[in-house]
C-alpha cells in the first residue's frame, strides 16, 4: 500500500513539473509574440479574419486578450477559445 501511495505522489510531482515547464515555455513564446507583434498580427488575422484592426491593436500580443476577443467576436466559450489558441500556437510557434 505504501509503495502505491509513494508512486502516486511521484507521478503527481512529475505532472506538476511538466505543467510548470509547459507554462514557462508558453510564457516565453508569448513574450516573443508580444515583442514581435507586427509579424504575428498577420498570422492571427489570417486565422481569425473577423478580428478587426482595433481588436488586433488591443490584443497587442497578449494571449489572454486574444482569448477574450475570440470569445467576443465568435460567440464561443472561454474553453473553446483557449483550445483554438492552443491549436494556433502549435502550428505557429514550433
Image (spheres, rainbow, N blue to C red):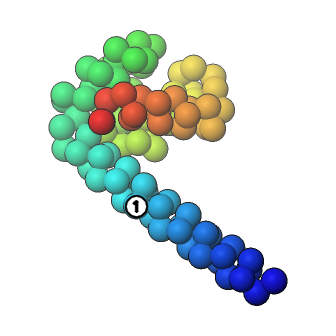
Q: Is residue 80 visible?
A: yes
Using a 10 Å C-alpha cutoff, classify the residue at mark 1 as few (fewer than 14 neighbours), some (14 to 19) or many (20 or more).
few
Q: Picture coordinates of residue 42 (x, y %)? A: 26, 20
Q: Picture coordinates of residue 73 (x, y %)? A: 53, 21
Q: Where 16 falls versus 42 (above or below)?
A: below
**Quarter-wise, where is residue 1 in the image?**
bottom right
Residue situated in front as seen by the camera: 77 or 88: 88
Which residue bears the numbered disc 1?
A: 21
Left or right: 78 with respect to 61? right
Q: Where 28 falls versus 69 (above or below)?
A: below
Left or right: 36 with respect to 19? left
Number of disc labels:
1
Residue beneath the point at 61% across and 37% down: 78
Q: In which quadrant of the rendered image does the C terminus lie?
A: top left
Q: Secondary structure at mark 1?
A: helix
Residue situated in front as seen by the camera: 15 or 73: 15
**Quarter-wise, where is residue 48 in the image?**
top left
Residue beneath the point at 47% across and 36% down: 86
Q: Is residue 54 visible?
A: no
Residue beneath the point at 19% across and 28% down: 39
Residue beneath the point at 63% across and 26% down: 76
Residue situated in front as seen by the camera: 24 or 31: 24
Amino acid at each position: 500500500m505504501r509503495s502505491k501511495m509513494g508512486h502516486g505522489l511521484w507521478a503527481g510531482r512529475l505532472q506538476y513539473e511538466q505543467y510548470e515547464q509547459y507554462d514557462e515555455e508558453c510564457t516565453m513564446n508569448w513574450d516573443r509574440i508580444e515583442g514581435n507583434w507586427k509579424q504575428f498580427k498577420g498570422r492571427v488575422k489570417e486565422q481569425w479574419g473577423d478580428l478587426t484592426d482595433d481588436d488586433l491593436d488591443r490584443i497587442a500580443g497578449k494571449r489572454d486578450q486574444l482569448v477574450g476577443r475570440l470569445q467576443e467576436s465568435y460567440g464561443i466559450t472561454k474553453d473553446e477559445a483557449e483550445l483554438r489558441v492552443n491549436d494556433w500556437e502549435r502550428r505557429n510557434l514550433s
